[in-house]
Image: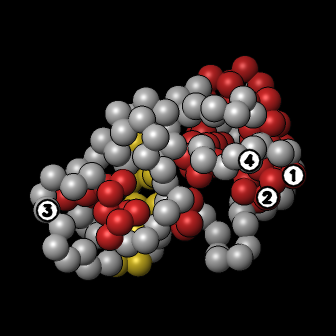
Amino acid sequence: IHVNGTAHEVRDAWLGESLLYVLRERLGLLAAKGASEQGACGSCSVEVDGRLVCSCLVLAASALDRPITTVEGLAAPGAPSDLQQAFVEEDALQCGYCTPGQVMAAEGFLRANAAPTVAEIQSGMSGNLCRCGAYQHIVNAVADVGENRRNGGEK
């Protein structure tokens, strides 16, 4: 399985294991979280072939030889991406449980819409739930990064 640019051999997996299970339990990539385990919350969001998916709903076997990106792959270890840093600066983390999925959703959203309005951000992020209610902070972080990137900042 190819995760964050690295090929991993996954031994002893059975055919019905979810991508979320393989990422967390077999590879030790713990950012994606299993909250609803039904694709209803977005806490397990990762990209497969550049498309945002709920990893709890994807069979790991269906993702073989397809590029998978988790939040751990957005930046070098110890150096947050601009989006991750914006989440910190805007207090969009709160408890942090939903944050990896929120960041993955925001990253894909900003690639598709480089100049979003607040309403577009709210709509684009609507599939990712936050139990702490940090929605305005999340919107602010996404808006800040969008503006920064448009003005020649990091990405």
Label ID, residue 89: 1
Label ID, residue 85: 2
Name the front one of labels 3 and 2: 3
Residue at (51% x, 43% y) in the render: 43
Seen in the image, is 104 located left or right of residue 152? left
Relative height, residue 36 to residue 154 (above, below): above
Q: Decide which of tag 4 and tag 3 comes sooner along the chain.
A: 3
Seen in the image, is 22 located left or right of residue 44? left
Residue 12 is at least partly visible in this image = yes
| Residue under pointer 3 | 14
Relative height, residue 128 to residue 20 (above, below): above
Q: CA distance from mark 4 to mark 3?
A: 34 Å
Label ID, residue 93: 4
Question: Which kind of residue does numbered mark 1 sit on?
Answer: Glu
Q: Nearer the viewer, residue 86 or 135?
A: 135
Q: Which quarter of the figure is the C terminus placed in? A: bottom right
Question: Which kind of residue does numbered mark 4 sit on?
Answer: Leu
Kindly state the secondary structure of the residue where label 4 is placed: loop
Q: CA distance from mark 1 to mark 2?
A: 6 Å
Q: CA distance from mark 4 to mark 1?
A: 9 Å
Seen in the image, is 74 located left or right of residue 62? right
